[in-house]
Amino acid sequence: MEMDSQRIRWYLWPLLVVSWLGVSVCHGESTKMNKDARSKLSSVQPAVWEKLAKKKIYFGHQSVGDNIITGLREVLLAYPQIKIKIQERAELVLPAGPALFHSYVGTNEKPMSKNEAFQTAITGMLRNNVDVAFFKYCYLDIGPSTEISALFRNYRQTMDALRKQNPNVMFVHITAPLTAIQTGWKASVKKALGKSPAGYPDNARRNEFNDVLRKEYVGKEPVFDLAKLETTRGDGSRMAYEFQGREYLSLAPEYTDDGGHLNETGRRYIAEQLLLFLAEEIANKRV
């Protein structure tokens, strides 16, 4: 039986008060993720940056990847000791020398096309002449209707084939990016009415894909956990929400202006973390 308008108002009132007072509907979780990336960049040994600058690195992506590339350019300007050359997207050809090469792969909302496009870029355009290679899905690639098992099976087959063909290449796995969720009084009203706030079901599926990827590769092969970084706020807490009895992560609002793409703060933060990740792989002689 539906509630009458008077009962709905009384039911929603405490939720609206909480929202008006600025209390987040998400909650933070303490984390050990580092919050001093810039000082860590300065502390990396010059020999590590020199070795990284001599590598041929390929990055396949779409628009969020463009954000990260912009962030990398900004970080490299601030840290001249990191002499990585970024090759423009239109110049994706057989590498004549070390650089970070990047290009668009596949079509958004068709993630399996990105698996195929990444494989084509490595074996075709770059002719297997790289030292490090990785690509990422877009948040648009994974939604409520995505068959996670089928997508991951295709992804794993692609990476297995590339690794077998290129045993000397370090292939990096990247978790799928997330989006910000709807918060505030509108989210409270939707929950009270039994509806899901924007971003809840979509991010749930992305979290599920990322859980499968982590289980398969963490501790065995290099994993750049983009999703985990995106959810880690400046104070070290995690942006999380509850949906259908489970806790899921979402993009921290301070890293985005439109709910999905990385803003200036977000792109630089992720770029710094990517450089630290690559430096650690170099220092550990994994590449």
Image (spheres, grey):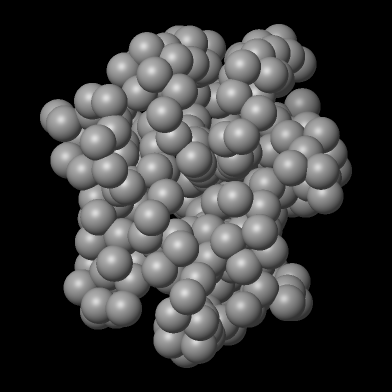
Nearer to me, 157 or 137: 157
Q: Nearer the viewer, residue 218 or 18?
A: 218
Residue at the (31%, 78%) spot, across then down? 81
Quarter holding the N terminus is top right
Q: Residue 176, percent across and down? A: 56, 38
Q: Residue at x 68, y 19 (%)?
A: 164
Residue 145, image x and y in percent?
Answer: 61, 15
Q: Nearer the viewer, residue 210 or 51?
A: 51
Question: In which quarter of the view is residue 76 placed?
Answer: bottom left
Q: Residue 79 vs residue 14: left or right?
A: left
Horizontal and vertical percent position of residue 161 = 65, 14
**Residue 92 left/right relative to 107:** left
Q: Residue at x 29, y 67 (%)?
A: 83
Relative to 76, 32 lies left or right: right
Q: Where is residue 220 in the image (x, y as percent from the top left)?
A: 81, 43
| 159 displayed left or right of 31 | left
Q: Is residue 2 visible?
A: yes
Which residue occupies 59% across, 24% down?
Answer: 166
Q: Is residue 16 visible?
A: no
Q: In which quarter of the image is residue 146?
A: top right
Q: Total number of numbered labels?
A: 0
Q: Nearer the viewer, residue 219 or 263?
A: 219
Is residue 120 positioned above or below 23 on the image? above
Q: In this view, does 263 lie above or below 128?
A: below
